[in-house]
Each structure stands twice: as C-alpha cells, then as structure tokens.
C-alpha cells in the first residue's frame, strides 16, 4: 500500500485510480507536446521552411506562454478547483495539436505552440500536482512522487511512438491522432477527477503539525527562500529542459550512430523512474530535504562523465543514467519542496508564482542549447550546463540556512 493510502477498500481503489488517471494524462500530455520536436524536428524544418533552431523555438513559445499564464492559472485552481482546469486544458491541447497538423509556415506553426502553451499550466504539472495535493493531504509527498514516477516515462514511451507514427502516417496525421487521444482519453479522466474530493479519503483524527501547516522556512525568511527556490529550479531546469531535447544530437556529434543515440537517450525515462521509485519507497524515512540535496549535488558531477571520459556509447549511457536519476529526484522536488518549505496554504497560487520564472527560463533553454551546439560546439554547451548546476548547488546551500532547525 502506498504511503498510508486511505482505509477502506472502496476509497483506497478510488485513490489509486485518481493517481493512475493523472499519470496517464500527464504521460500523454508531455509526450505529445514538449517531447514531440525531438523526433520530427528535421521533417518539420524541411516541410515548413524553418531552421532547426526555429523549430525548437516552438517549444520555447509554448513554455513562455505557459509561464506568463501560470500565476493566473494557479489562482484559478485555488478558486474553482484543479479538476475543472485540467478538463479545459485537455481541450486546449487538442486544439493546439489540430492547428499544428495544419501548419504550412511560421505564420501557422507558432500560433499552434501558443495554444499548447496555454495547455501547459492548465493540463500539465501545476493542476495535476495541485489536484493530487488536494486529495492526498499529509500524504502528498509520496503521492506526488508516485505520480511523477510514472510520468518520468513520457519520453521513453513517446519517442518510439512518435517515430513510428511519423514514418507510417506522417507527422500531420500523427498530430491529429494525438489530438484525438487528448479528447478521448485525457478529457474524460479529468472530468471524473473533478468529482473526486479530499473528504472521500480523509482519515479520522488526521491532523497537521505547525511545520506541516506553515512549512520548514522560518517566517522572516519566506520571501528570500521563495526567490532562492525559484533560482534553484530555474538553473536546474534550464539544463534539464534544454539538454534533454538535444541528447540525440549530442550523442550523434560524438560519432555515435543514430539508432544507438536514440536508444541511449531513451534510457533517460527509466533512470528517472528508478530514482523516483527509490524516493517513493525510502524518501520518507530520511530528513525531508535529503533527496533534494542528493539530486542537486550529483547533477554537476554527472557532466564529468562527458567532459572527461571517452565519448562513446558506454560513457554516454553512464551519463544518461546518472544525470537522469538526479533529474528524477529533482522533478519530485519541484513539486514537493515548495510544499515542505512553505506549507499547503495557497499551494496552487504558490506553484503558479514559481512557474513564471522557471518556465520563462525553460522557454529559452531548448533554443539556447540548440544554438550553442550548432554555433559554439558541444563542449561549450556542456560547460555552460555544468556551471549552471554548480550555481544551483550554491543556491541550495543558502536556502538550507533558512529552514527551521
């Protein structure tokens, strides 16, 4: 049984169904939006008359729009509930994919990504995590970890499917099939989740300590801690969101064959999932911030495998496993650390505020890394990534000084 799931067979089954439903919609959501260009970038560039950088700029547009909409969506979640926001988000993403399928130039390509950008804060991450926190109460940390454990497979599942469909039916029909999936699978799940309430799972006598209610950060340091948390996640996200879409190109630049490069890069998902499994199974047994500390400090060390070691398939695989495992821990931290530091009050709005700087940085990341690799070379891109991870470590060290002893 996961993390003290609610007592009673009926409520327990419903609780697990809620987590499973969110896991399905999040895997489909990320796999059919953010991860899409990594496989079909060359085809999009050739057919739309765009450079490879401008193709990835679509992802940047999506993340920038999502960042700007994030704070408002966070407040909306607290006002009307995450379930309703998720339902609307599924329809918006489906519409965005339909528009993408009809793109013929930049004039129609980028509006599609604007629609997908509205779908990011309404159907992905923020409302999903808020809904899970809403129904999980004090069990939110492990519930979120369980959700992200499954969503970590998005790239590993989406890339082979995207490659197969684009080869067999073409990328336009593929986008239409993805849109139909959001309407037929994701939207009904979100409609059902809108009827799932916290009181259906509440345990008798469940109470929260002062730290659980108000968070680990001392009240006088809350504003500074919020800024440091945003900086920590933005630096790490710049690397993880920007570099993950370039892994295949990076490994090909090492002289690794395309098939092997895709296979190695696809291990990103399983490695992240294993790390998240460890967090779900054992994270609650250690100090609350232990996983965050491990994930943050291992990230810069992982780049030594590429910067110092031989550039072959074996070392590339070692890098993917270590880097992705650390990112897997940090993916959970992005959802649970704000809850631990600041408490559950106004959690949706808090996630929305944190998403603004993060997603603006995430928006720049794919284009920035594509430009660095194409114009400055692989080494410069890898060194920039390493420096960002080191700065994130320093931000965490300062943040740790602000928590309650």
Image: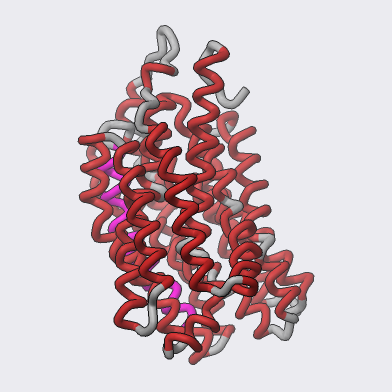
Q: Is residue 366 magenta?
A: yes
Residue 95 appearing in the image: yes
Q: How many marks?
A: 0
Residue in the foreground of this view, choosing between 271 and 11: 11
Q: Residue furthest right?
A: 314
Q: Name, please, the residue furthest toward the top.
A: 204
User: What segment carries the magenta color?
Assistant: 347-370
- Side of 63 relative to 302 (left or right): left
Q: Residue at x 28, y 43 (%)?
A: 350
Name the residue at 56% across, 77% down.
382
Look at 52% across and 48% down and name the residue there.
Answer: 293
User: What secondary structure is the magenta-colored segment mainly?
Assistant: helix
Quadrant location, the N terminus: top right
Q: Is residue 148 above or below residue 12?
A: below
Vertical relation: 207 (above or below) 242: above
Q: Residue at x 44, y 84 (%)?
A: 53
Residue 85 falls in which quadrant of the image? top left
Residue 217 seen from this side: no
What x and y, as percent, mark residue 314? 79, 70
Tell which of 96 and 303 is nearer to you: 96
Q: How far across and down, in percent of the image, does residue 245 sit?
A: 53, 71
Residue 220 covered by magenta stretch: no
Q: Quadrant of residue 311?
A: bottom right
**Residue 285 sits above or below residue 42 on the image:** above
- Asked if 215 appears above or below 99 in the picture, the reply is above
Q: Position of residue 204 (x, y in %)?
A: 42, 8
Q: Position of residue 196 (x, y in %)?
A: 39, 26
Is 194 left, or right, of 346 in this rendering? right
């Amino acid at each position: 049984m996961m993390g003290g799931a609610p007592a009673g067979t009926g409520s327990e089954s419903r609780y697990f169904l809620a987590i499973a439903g969110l896991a399905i919609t999040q895997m489909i959501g990320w796999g059919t939006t953010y991860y899409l260009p990594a496989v079909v970038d060359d085809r999009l560039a050739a057919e739309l008359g765009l450079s490879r950088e401008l193709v990835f700029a679509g992802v940047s547009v999506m993340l920038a729009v999502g960042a700007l909409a994030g704070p408002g969506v966070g407040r909306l979640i607290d006002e009307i509930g995450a379930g309703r926001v998720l339902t609307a988000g599924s329809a918006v993403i489906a519409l965005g994919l339909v528009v993408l399928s009809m793109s013929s130039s930049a004039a129609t390509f980028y509006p599609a990504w604007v629609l997908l950008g509205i779908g990011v804060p309404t159907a992905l991450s923020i409302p999903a995590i808020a809904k899970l926190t809403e129904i999980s109460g004090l069990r939110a940390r492990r519930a979120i970890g369980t959700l992200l454990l499954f969503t970590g497979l998005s790239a590993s599942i989406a890339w082979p499917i995207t490659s197969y469909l684009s080869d067999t039916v073409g990328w336009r029909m593929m986008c239409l099939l993805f849109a139909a999936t959001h309407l037929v699978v994701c939207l009904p799940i979100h409609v059902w989740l809108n009827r799932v309430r916290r009181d259906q799972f509440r345990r008798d006598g469940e109470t929260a300590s002062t730290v659980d209610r108000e968070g680990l950060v001392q009240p006088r340091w809350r504003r500074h801690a919020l800024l440091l948390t945003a900086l920590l996640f933005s630096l790490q996200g710049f690397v993880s969101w920007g570099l993950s879409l370039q892994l295949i190109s990076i490994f090909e630049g090492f002289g690794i064959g395309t098939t092997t490069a895709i296979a190695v890069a696809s291990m990103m998902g399983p490695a992240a999932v294993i790390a998240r499994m460890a967090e779900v199974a054992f994270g609650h047994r250690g100090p609350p911030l232990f996983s965050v500390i491990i994930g943050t400090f291992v990230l810069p060390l992982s780049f030594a495998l590429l910067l110092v070691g031989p550039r072959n398939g074996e070392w590339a695989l070692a890098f993917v496993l270590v880097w992705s495992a650390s990112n897997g821990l940090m993916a959970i931290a992005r959802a649970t650390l704000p809850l631990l530091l600041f408490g559950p009050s106004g959690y949706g709005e808090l996630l929305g505020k944190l998403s603004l700087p993060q997603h603006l940085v995430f928006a720049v990341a794919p284009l920035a890394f594509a430009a660095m690799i194409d114009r400055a070379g692989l080494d410069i891109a890898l060194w920039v990534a390493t420096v960002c991870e080191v700065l994130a470590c320093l931000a965490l060290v300062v943040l740790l000084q602000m928590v309650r002893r």
